[in-house]
Image: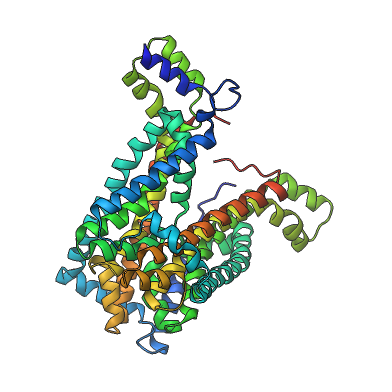
Amino acid sequence: MTAVGTALAAGQPAAGNGTRPWYAAPLALQLAAGVVLLGAWEIGVRMLAPAYVARPSRVVVVFLRVLSDAQFLAAAAATLRAVLEGLLLSIMLGTVIGLAMGRVVAVERGLRYYVNSLFATPMVAILPLMSLWFGYDGDARLATVVFAALFSVVVNTCDGARAVPNDYLEVAHSFRARGWRTLLDVVLPASLPYLLAGVRLAAGRALVAAVVAEFFVSIPGLGYYILFNSRTFKHSEAFVAVIVLVAVGVGFDALINWITRRYLPWARRGG
Amino acid sequence: MKLRHGRAEYLTIAASLALGALAWEVAGHSTSGAFWAPLSATLKNLWDITREGVLLRQCASSFQLYVSGLMLAIAVGAPLGVLLARVAWLRTALDPYIMMLYATPMVALVPFILSIMGFGFAPKVLVVFLFAVFPVIYNTVEGARSVRPELIEVAHAFRSREWQLWRDVMIPYTLPFTMTGIRQAIARGLVGMIVAEFFLSPSGLGQMIMMGSQNFDTAGMLSAILVIVVVGVGLMDLGRLLENRFAVWRGETR
């Protein structure tokens, strides 16, 4: 009997339940879960792990100090800059290649295998090659970011350019639009939702690529900050950098979502 | 738009692959050996390491790591996801944290794992696991959101027991979404595998790349990268196959 009761409660949709007690409100539940998770982490580390291991109480103590540390800020700026530059380069290059592949059959056939296999390849694998080509400095990081991000933009833009409804193209044609006008005014806007989906995927990959490149090449950045501080057993300081990375990742996701809703309200991509 | 598989298509593709191979060969001959090796040298290296059994041994080592981490991720992620699908209040409570962990670049945790757990097999499996587990949980929970309450009500009206409800409603309904998560986990796990082999105790294909670059054996490095490209493409196809196989179960939810 109780099983049925709880099951029915579980089956209720969350919204539109006016009689719900305050402690069952989503926010209260989520805050409670956060407290439980942080508490478990704190107690687990205190009981089981060595003293240097990061735990919430220590992270809170060092948080503001690390955030106002000039060295940390420079590291964060370097990483974010590389990610943004790499993303911009990937978006520009990727849009051009993707549109060409989507609309010109010969280009698609020529590049298909290269793009698909590089899209499927974990770009971590080419890190040593990048450091050989570009030296042990920021260029290797930028190149890794571009390699990691570019192909998700290309693949998605290509899908988008191919999915443009024929009706649009026929209308453009009957209004005697030139080829490049059609491309800029019809194909590009119609592929934008796909492009944004690609950028979203690319942003995650770019962040990973930048961090890994910093591990490997040892250049100042959030990844190197984490590596250096965890080696010297300052795990709580290093963890602040992880928090910043998560915030950037989540923030970028939210930004893309917002852009899609605000500027492309007609785009509802299925699947 | 349906792609036609005509003769012209195969010709263009063959020409582009031949051109790529030629460019690879020429680039290898016209630059310093430290930067790039010709395709012929790379293939010769690949043949040598295959014959000596090095490739098979290293692949087996990578495979063991990859499969352990991935299976662990699926074994933990899928049941947890379905549990969250069934228990709505727990799902609501954990939702933001799962999303956050899904978006976390797990690679940032590798130095902590190295420093706490040191070298060995277990920390490497943990890395692959962390890379792979959150896509599985996240997508399963995403699927859970789409289980219609009516289905559960109908099941109860027919006096379904709890385990019948799981077997007939919860699992079939969330499985296609779990498969999407597994597809993502297959790709992310491969990244995790190479990261683990690079930055924790060196082994497998990652070690082959690393050794090639340290000894300026560019052909050796390129042949290992080539193997990873082929494995990556194969795994991506496998993931798509799995996802499409179960996609028909999704039905119309939109």
Image quarter where the N terminus of chain A lies is: top left
Residue A194 shows in the view:
no
**At x 62% / y 49%, what residue is drawn?**
A257
Q: Residue reaching furthest left?
A: B52
**At x 40% / y 37%, what residue is drawn?**
B245
In this view, A43 is above or below B145: below
Q: List x then y, in percent, for residue B183.
A: 40, 47
Left or right: residue B90 compared with residue B2: left
Q: Quadrant of residue A167?
A: top right
Q: List x then y, in percent, for residue B201.
A: 23, 68
The number of callouts visible is 0
Q: Nearer the viewer, residue B227 or B106?
A: B106
**At x 44% / y 58%, what residue is drawn?**
A60
Left or right: residue A111 compared with residue B116: right
Residue A3 shows in the view:
yes
Q: Residue reaching furthest right?
A: A175
In this view, A29 is above or below B185: above
Q: List x then y, in percent, for residue A217.
A: 40, 78
**At x 79% / y 61%, what residue is drawn?**
A178
Q: Nearer the viewer, residue A199 or B130?
A: B130
Q: Nearer the viewer, residue B214 or A151?
A: B214
Name the image colouring: rainbow
Q: Quadrant of residue B40?
A: bottom left
Image quarter where the C terminus of chain A lies is: top right
